[in-house]
């Protein structure tokens, strides 16, 4: 039987490598996890395809790292990203 990683282990993993976000079981996803992944590297935004995790904090962090980061935003979520960064762009 394979041991599953705990939430804390996944959180530490995304702090080391943002690509780990792609391997985290969806039931363990949180806003905190997504924010930590994009803090490590804004391109982790490409893994976020749910409006639930595309928070204002995530969008601002991504924009601070790369103003052209919209290319990593899931096409169905671009209007949300635009709304959040409108005041800082």
Image: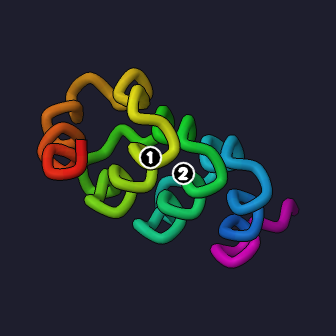
Q: Secondary structure at mark 1?
A: helix
Give coordinates of residue 34: x percent, y percent.
49, 58
Residue 4 horizontal side relative to residue 26, left or right:
right
Range of the magenta residues?
A: 1-9
Give coordinates of residue 19: x percent, y percent.
69, 41
Disc 2 versus disc 1: distance between alpha carbons?
6 Å
Q: Quadrant of residue 53?
A: bottom left
For marks 2 and 1, the one nearer the N-term is 2
Give the residue drawn at x 62%, y 45%: 41
Give coordinates of residue 52: x percent, y percent.
27, 56
> Who is closer to the viewer here, 5 or 86?
86
Q: Quadrant of residue 42?
A: top right
Disc number for residue 22: none
The N terminus: image quadrant: bottom right
Q: Main secondary structure of the magenta part?
A: loop
Q: Which residue is mark 1?
A: 62
Q: Is residue 50 above or below residue 12?
A: above
Q: Secondary structure at mark 2?
A: helix
Give the residue drawn at x 39%, y 21%: 71
Q: Which residue is mark 2?
A: 38
Q: Residues within 10 Å of mark 2 (few under 14, many from 20)?
A: many
> Who is closer to the viewer here, 26 or 41?
41
Give coordinates of residue 11: x percent, y percent.
66, 69
Q: Quadrant of residue 82?
A: top left
Residue 4 magenta-highlighted: yes
**Viewer-nearest of discs 2 and 1:** 1
Residue 61 horizontal side relative to residue 21, left or right:
left
């Amino acid at each position: 039987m394979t041991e599953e990683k705990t939430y804390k282990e996944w959180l530490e993993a995304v702090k080391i490598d943002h690509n780990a976000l792609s391997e985290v079981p969806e039931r363990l996803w949180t806003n905190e996890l997504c924010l930590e992944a994009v803090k490590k590297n804004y391109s982790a935004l490409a893994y976020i395809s749910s409006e639930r995790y595309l928070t204002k904090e995530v969008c601002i962090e991504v924009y601070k790292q790369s103003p052209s980061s919209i290319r990593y935003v899931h096409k169905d979520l671009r209007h949300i990203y635009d709304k959040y960064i409108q005041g800082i762009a």
